[in-house]
Image (cartoon, grey):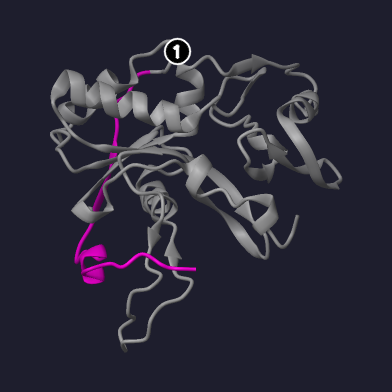
Amino acid sequence: MSHPVHEDPAEEAVQELRAFGIRGLPEIKAGADLAGMIHDAAAAQDTPLESGDVVVVTQKIISKAEDQIVQIDPTNPLSHKPLVEQESVRILRRRGELIISETKHGFVCANAGIDLSNVERGTAALLPEDSDRSARRIRDALQGRFQIEVAVIISDTFGRPWRRGVTDVAIGSAGVKPILDLRGTPDALGREMQVTEIALVDELACAAELVMGKATATPVAVIRGAAESWMGEGSVAADVVRAPADDLFR
Protein backbone atom coordinates (compact mmCIF):
# COMPACT_ATOMS: atom_id res chain seq x y z
CA MET A 1 0.00 0.00 0.00
CA SER A 2 1.36 3.39 -0.94
CA HIS A 3 1.26 6.15 1.64
CA PRO A 4 0.85 9.87 1.05
CA VAL A 5 4.00 11.94 0.90
CA HIS A 6 4.07 14.98 3.18
CA GLU A 7 6.49 17.62 2.00
CA ASP A 8 6.98 19.11 5.48
CA PRO A 9 5.53 17.04 8.33
CA ALA A 10 6.92 19.53 10.83
CA GLU A 11 4.13 21.85 9.75
CA GLU A 12 1.65 19.50 11.46
CA ALA A 13 2.88 20.61 14.91
CA VAL A 14 2.27 23.92 16.64
CA GLN A 15 4.20 25.55 19.46
CA GLU A 16 1.20 26.82 21.39
CA LEU A 17 -2.57 26.44 21.55
CA ARG A 18 -5.04 28.49 23.56
CA ALA A 19 -8.38 27.07 24.70
CA PHE A 20 -11.17 29.07 26.35
CA GLY A 21 -14.82 28.53 27.09
CA ILE A 22 -17.70 30.59 25.73
CA ARG A 23 -20.01 31.47 28.61
CA GLY A 24 -23.33 33.22 28.77
CA LEU A 25 -25.29 31.22 26.21
CA PRO A 26 -29.02 31.17 26.95
CA GLU A 27 -30.94 27.93 27.48
CA ILE A 28 -31.10 26.18 24.13
CA LYS A 29 -34.51 25.39 22.67
CA ALA A 30 -35.53 23.55 19.52
CA GLY A 31 -34.74 25.62 16.44
CA ALA A 32 -32.20 27.80 18.26
CA ASP A 33 -29.79 29.87 16.15
CA LEU A 34 -26.63 28.29 17.53
CA ALA A 35 -24.25 30.12 15.18
CA GLY A 36 -25.67 33.51 16.15
CA MET A 37 -25.71 32.65 19.85
CA ILE A 38 -22.11 31.47 19.81
CA HIS A 39 -20.97 34.51 17.86
CA ASP A 40 -22.74 36.94 20.19
CA ALA A 41 -21.67 35.20 23.41
CA ALA A 42 -18.03 35.17 22.30
CA ALA A 43 -18.16 38.88 21.51
CA ALA A 44 -19.94 39.68 24.80
CA GLN A 45 -17.10 38.17 26.83
CA ASP A 46 -14.52 40.10 24.81
CA THR A 47 -13.19 37.02 23.00
CA PRO A 48 -14.74 37.46 19.54
CA LEU A 49 -14.36 34.59 17.12
CA GLU A 50 -11.50 34.85 14.65
CA SER A 51 -10.88 33.13 11.34
CA GLY A 52 -8.77 30.04 11.98
CA ASP A 53 -10.44 29.25 15.31
CA VAL A 54 -11.73 25.76 16.05
CA VAL A 55 -15.14 25.99 17.71
CA VAL A 56 -16.04 22.93 19.79
CA VAL A 57 -19.73 22.48 20.61
CA THR A 58 -21.11 19.82 22.92
CA GLN A 59 -23.56 17.28 21.59
CA LYS A 60 -26.14 18.26 24.20
CA ILE A 61 -26.92 21.69 22.80
CA ILE A 62 -26.93 20.31 19.26
CA SER A 63 -29.51 17.73 20.34
CA LYS A 64 -31.59 20.43 22.03
CA ALA A 65 -31.46 22.75 19.00
CA GLU A 66 -32.34 19.91 16.64
CA ASP A 67 -35.23 18.69 18.82
CA GLN A 68 -33.58 15.39 19.71
CA ILE A 69 -34.98 15.53 23.25
CA VAL A 70 -37.60 12.92 24.14
CA GLN A 71 -39.89 12.42 27.12
CA ILE A 72 -39.32 9.61 29.62
CA ASP A 73 -40.93 8.64 32.91
CA PRO A 74 -39.31 10.79 35.63
CA THR A 75 -40.32 8.28 38.33
CA ASN A 76 -38.63 5.31 36.66
CA PRO A 77 -34.80 5.42 36.54
CA LEU A 78 -34.83 2.76 33.81
CA SER A 79 -37.44 4.36 31.58
CA HIS A 80 -34.79 5.34 29.03
CA LYS A 81 -33.73 1.74 28.42
CA PRO A 82 -36.26 1.10 25.61
CA LEU A 83 -34.74 4.11 23.86
CA VAL A 84 -31.33 2.44 24.04
CA GLU A 85 -32.69 -0.58 22.20
CA GLN A 86 -34.44 1.70 19.70
CA GLU A 87 -31.32 3.75 18.94
CA SER A 88 -28.99 0.73 18.66
CA VAL A 89 -28.31 -1.30 15.56
CA ARG A 90 -26.42 -3.90 17.56
CA ILE A 91 -25.95 -4.74 21.23
CA LEU A 92 -22.35 -5.71 21.95
CA ARG A 93 -22.36 -6.26 25.72
CA ARG A 94 -24.72 -6.17 28.67
CA ARG A 95 -23.72 -5.99 32.32
CA GLY A 96 -26.48 -5.22 34.76
CA GLU A 97 -28.11 -2.00 33.65
CA LEU A 98 -25.20 -1.08 31.37
CA ILE A 99 -25.52 -1.69 27.65
CA ILE A 100 -22.66 -1.22 25.18
CA SER A 101 -24.13 -0.86 21.73
CA GLU A 102 -23.44 0.32 18.22
CA THR A 103 -25.50 3.25 16.97
CA LYS A 104 -26.66 3.86 13.42
CA HIS A 105 -23.82 6.40 13.17
CA GLY A 106 -21.28 3.60 13.75
CA PHE A 107 -20.36 4.73 17.29
CA VAL A 108 -19.77 2.03 19.90
CA CYS A 109 -20.70 3.53 23.25
CA ALA A 110 -22.67 3.12 26.46
CA ASN A 111 -26.46 3.21 26.18
CA ALA A 112 -26.41 4.27 22.50
CA GLY A 113 -25.18 7.71 23.53
CA ILE A 114 -28.49 8.55 25.25
CA ASP A 115 -27.84 11.11 27.97
CA LEU A 116 -29.83 12.18 31.00
CA SER A 117 -27.41 14.81 32.30
CA ASN A 118 -27.90 18.54 31.74
CA VAL A 119 -31.44 18.04 30.47
CA GLU A 120 -34.70 18.58 32.33
CA ARG A 121 -35.94 15.78 34.58
CA GLY A 122 -38.25 13.51 32.63
CA THR A 123 -36.36 13.95 29.38
CA ALA A 124 -33.43 12.28 27.62
CA ALA A 125 -31.13 13.54 24.87
CA LEU A 126 -30.61 11.41 21.78
CA LEU A 127 -27.56 11.82 19.57
CA PRO A 128 -27.98 14.19 16.62
CA GLU A 129 -29.13 12.53 13.41
CA ASP A 130 -25.95 13.62 11.57
CA SER A 131 -23.34 15.45 13.63
CA ASP A 132 -21.09 16.13 10.61
CA ARG A 133 -24.02 17.95 9.02
CA SER A 134 -24.66 19.83 12.27
CA ALA A 135 -21.05 21.01 12.31
CA ARG A 136 -21.27 22.14 8.68
CA ARG A 137 -24.39 24.17 9.39
CA ILE A 138 -22.72 26.12 12.18
CA ARG A 139 -19.52 26.63 10.18
CA ASP A 140 -21.40 27.78 7.09
CA ALA A 141 -23.62 30.15 9.09
CA LEU A 142 -20.63 31.78 10.81
CA GLN A 143 -18.89 32.22 7.46
CA GLY A 144 -21.93 33.38 5.53
CA ARG A 145 -23.34 35.79 8.11
CA PHE A 146 -20.24 37.04 9.89
CA GLN A 147 -17.42 36.36 7.38
CA ILE A 148 -15.52 34.30 9.94
CA GLU A 149 -13.89 31.12 8.63
CA VAL A 150 -13.72 28.65 11.50
CA ALA A 151 -13.68 24.89 11.90
CA VAL A 152 -16.39 23.27 14.01
CA ILE A 153 -16.28 20.08 16.07
CA ILE A 154 -19.27 18.45 17.78
CA SER A 155 -18.05 16.67 20.92
CA ASP A 156 -19.46 14.05 23.27
CA THR A 157 -18.22 12.13 26.29
CA PHE A 158 -17.31 8.48 25.78
CA GLY A 159 -15.88 5.81 28.04
CA ARG A 160 -12.92 3.76 26.89
CA PRO A 161 -12.18 0.04 27.04
CA TRP A 162 -9.19 -0.93 29.18
CA ARG A 163 -8.87 2.52 30.78
CA ARG A 164 -10.76 4.18 33.61
CA GLY A 165 -12.37 7.57 33.18
CA VAL A 166 -14.27 9.23 30.37
CA THR A 167 -12.94 11.58 27.75
CA ASP A 168 -14.49 13.76 25.08
CA VAL A 169 -14.33 12.70 21.45
CA ALA A 170 -15.55 14.22 18.21
CA ILE A 171 -18.81 12.86 16.79
CA GLY A 172 -18.95 15.43 13.98
CA SER A 173 -16.68 17.98 12.33
CA ALA A 174 -16.43 20.50 9.52
CA GLY A 175 -13.48 22.50 8.23
CA VAL A 176 -10.80 20.50 10.03
CA LYS A 177 -9.09 17.27 8.98
CA PRO A 178 -10.44 14.46 11.17
CA ILE A 179 -7.21 12.49 10.86
CA LEU A 180 -3.62 13.64 10.41
CA ASP A 181 -2.07 10.88 8.33
CA LEU A 182 1.67 10.78 8.97
CA ARG A 183 2.31 7.45 7.30
CA GLY A 184 5.24 7.67 4.94
CA THR A 185 6.83 10.62 6.74
CA PRO A 186 10.03 10.46 8.82
CA ASP A 187 9.99 10.43 12.60
CA ALA A 188 12.46 12.50 14.67
CA LEU A 189 15.22 9.96 13.93
CA GLY A 190 14.49 9.74 10.23
CA ARG A 191 12.64 6.41 10.26
CA GLU A 192 9.60 6.22 8.04
CA MET A 193 6.37 5.99 10.02
CA GLN A 194 4.22 3.10 8.87
CA VAL A 195 0.96 3.32 10.84
CA THR A 196 0.82 6.71 12.57
CA GLU A 197 -2.53 8.45 12.10
CA ILE A 198 -3.37 11.16 14.63
CA ALA A 199 -7.04 11.48 15.66
CA LEU A 200 -6.86 15.26 15.43
CA VAL A 201 -10.54 16.01 16.04
CA ASP A 202 -10.61 13.80 19.14
CA GLU A 203 -7.53 15.49 20.59
CA LEU A 204 -9.06 18.93 20.00
CA ALA A 205 -12.32 17.78 21.60
CA CYS A 206 -10.38 16.63 24.68
CA ALA A 207 -8.56 19.94 24.95
CA ALA A 208 -11.83 21.85 24.72
CA GLU A 209 -13.49 19.76 27.44
CA LEU A 210 -10.90 20.89 29.96
CA VAL A 211 -12.22 24.46 29.77
CA MET A 212 -15.89 23.46 29.52
CA GLY A 213 -16.31 21.01 32.38
CA LYS A 214 -19.38 18.89 33.08
CA ALA A 215 -21.34 21.16 35.42
CA THR A 216 -20.42 24.74 34.52
CA ALA A 217 -23.00 25.51 31.81
CA THR A 218 -20.21 26.10 29.28
CA PRO A 219 -21.21 24.05 26.23
CA VAL A 220 -18.91 25.76 23.73
CA ALA A 221 -15.16 26.30 23.66
CA VAL A 222 -12.71 27.82 21.21
CA ILE A 223 -9.25 26.52 20.41
CA ARG A 224 -7.03 29.20 18.94
CA GLY A 225 -3.66 28.71 17.27
CA ALA A 226 -4.42 25.62 15.20
CA ALA A 227 -2.05 24.97 12.33
CA GLU A 228 -3.30 26.01 8.91
CA SER A 229 -2.35 22.53 7.68
CA TRP A 230 -4.93 21.04 10.06
CA MET A 231 -7.77 22.72 8.22
CA GLY A 232 -9.56 20.81 5.49
CA GLU A 233 -12.56 18.67 4.76
CA GLY A 234 -13.54 15.30 6.09
CA SER A 235 -16.11 13.44 8.12
CA VAL A 236 -15.98 11.80 11.54
CA ALA A 237 -18.44 9.15 10.38
CA ALA A 238 -16.41 8.35 7.25
CA ASP A 239 -12.85 9.02 8.39
CA VAL A 240 -12.67 8.29 12.13
CA VAL A 241 -15.12 5.47 12.83
CA ARG A 242 -13.31 2.20 12.23
CA ALA A 243 -15.06 -0.16 9.83
CA PRO A 244 -16.16 -3.44 11.45
CA ALA A 245 -13.96 -5.39 9.02
CA ASP A 246 -10.91 -3.57 10.43
CA ASP A 247 -11.95 -3.93 14.06
CA LEU A 248 -10.31 -6.78 16.00
CA PHE A 249 -12.94 -6.67 18.75
CA ARG A 250 -16.21 -6.90 16.79
The residue at 26%/69% (across/down) is 9
Q: Is 207 left or right of 45, judged from the image as shown?
A: right
Q: Residue 140's x, y, as percent?
A: 27, 25
Asked which quadrant contains residue 39, the reply is top left
Identify the magenta region. 1-26
In depth, the one of 89 and 204 nearer the eye is: 89
In depth, the one of 110 and 3 nearer the eye is: 3
> Where does the C terminus fall, quadrant-wise?
bottom right
Examine the structure image and report whether residue 2 is included in the region drawn in magenta: yes
76 is higher (above) or lower (below) than 150: above
Q: Residues within 10 Å of mark 1 (few under 14, many from 20)?
A: some
In depth, the one of 237 and 93 nearer the eye is: 237
Q: Secondary structure at mark 1?
A: loop
Q: Main secondary structure of the magenta part?
A: loop
In depth, the one of 80 and 216 nearer the eye is: 80
Label total for image: 1
The residue at 51%/28% (across/down) is 130
Q: Is 247 left or right of 138, judged from the image as shown?
A: right
107 is higher (above) or lower (below) than 160: above
The residue at 23%/55% (across/down) is 229
Residue positioned most to the front: 1
The residue at 63%/20% (across/down) is 121
Asked which quadrant contains residue 245, the reply is bottom right
122 is higher (above) or lower (below) than 181: above
Residue at the spot of label 1: 29
Q: Residue 170's x, y, as percent?
A: 46, 44
Residue type at tag 1 = Lys
Residue positioned most to the bottom: 189
Q: Residue 5's x, y, as percent?
A: 31, 68
94 is higher (above) or lower (below) than 140: below
Q: Residue 247's x, y, as percent?
A: 68, 58
